[in-house]
Every structure is written in structure tokens, then in C-alpha cells.
Amino acid sequence: VLPSFGASMNLMQLSQQATDGSHGLSVSGKLKLDYEQTSSTAERTRLTADGAVVIAAHTHQSYSDTVTLQNGFEQLSFYDMSSGITRNDATGLLESEAAGSGLLIVSTPQSIEVADTDQYPRSGVVKIAGQGSIVLTATSASTVQIALDADGDESYESRRDESWDWLF
């Protein structure tokens, strides 16, 4: 039997800025971080919003938004050292100033997979739903499909493929 390792901490303030100033974010609020090494080649990390967590972000596309993760919003990551793959799932409620339509539901119908060798996800699906929904599908480590369902009837009025660099 291998010994396991676990840790828990609270994060209060975080910020990240690209060196070229093209994008960045700041996080204000309390995030609980739980980490566990589940085997000699696997680990699990859970980030949970403990109260409202405000994220201010801007991108190179002249887009900015302030998003508030609601209490209990969660990101769960599983890392397999032998394959070099991280699987990520997110679930919970958020508010977006740019969307301006109240609470939005975030889910991952298919886990987001990122390889150690890739900058962006290679597979997986994230859905953000309110009155309508937007679905981001990683089709490769360089391309994401963006689908828009404007009225929430599960019929997507618009789909387009973009590079991850374009999105972020």
C-alpha cells in the first residue's frame, strides 16, 4: 500500500498578467484548494469558491468582463502522471457583467483534457447556460468550436471554429 498525501489551503487573492500585457486576470475572494495524491502516478485537485469570488479578466481581443463565481462553484482536476493528461471538470453558478442576464450555469458534459505537451485543451466540452447557451468544444489542442444557442431550445443558431489563441 502506497502512502497518500493530502493538503488543504485557502487562497485569498490571486493575479496573473501576460508579460506582453495582452491578457490577464485578477481574482478576489476565497477559494478553498484541496489536493490529494491518490497513487504514485495520480493526483486530484479541487478548487471551490467559499463565498463569492470575483474575477476581472481582459484579453487581446479588447474584451473584458467581471465574472462572479457563486459559493460552491467547483473545478475538479485529475492528473495522470503516466499519461501526462489532466482532466478538468467545472460545475456551478456564475454571473457575468458582460452577459448581463443573471445567473449562468456552468457544466462540463465531457471532461476537458489537457496534455503536458499542449498549451490548450485537446478534447472536452464546456457549456454555459442561461436564457440561451454557449458551448465550447475542444476539437484539438489548437482549435475550439464555439456554438451559440440564443434561445435555449438546444438548437444551435451559430457555430464556428477558432484557434485557442484567438479565444484567449
Image (spheres, rainbow, N blue to C red):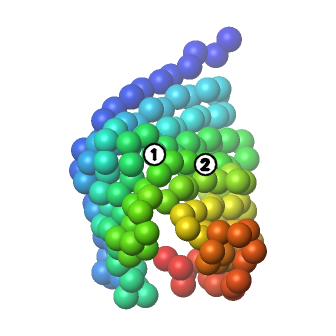
Do labels 1 and 2 touch, CB within 8 Å?
no
Which residue appears at 39% of the width and 28% of the height?
8
Task: Check the image and report above or below for 122 versus 109.
Answer: below
Mark 1 or 2, nearer chain start: 1
Q: Position of residue 56 (x, y in %)?
A: 30, 67
Which residue appears at 32% of the width and 51% of the height?
53
Task: Check the image and report above or below for 154 versus 6.
Answer: below
> Left or right: 165 with respect to 148?
left
Query: Does any portion of residue 141 appear in the rendered image?
Result: no
> Left or right: 149 with respect to 60?
right
- Residue 63's image quarter? bottom left
Which residue appears at 68% of the width and 11% of the height?
1
Q: Position of residue 104 (x, y in %)?
A: 49, 60
For label 2, count other residues whose C-alpha is less than 10 Å away and answer few (under 14), some (14-19) or many (20+). Answer: many
Q: Which residue bears the numbered disc 2?
A: 89
Which numbered disc covers residue 73? 1
Disc 2 secondary structure class: strand
Q: Amino acid at mark 1?
A: Phe
Task: Check the image and report above or below for 64 versus 85.
Answer: below
- Residue 28's image quarter? bottom left
Disc 1 secondary structure class: loop
Relative to the observer, which residue lies in front, 87 or 132? Answer: 132
For marks 1 and 2, give the CA distance: 11 Å
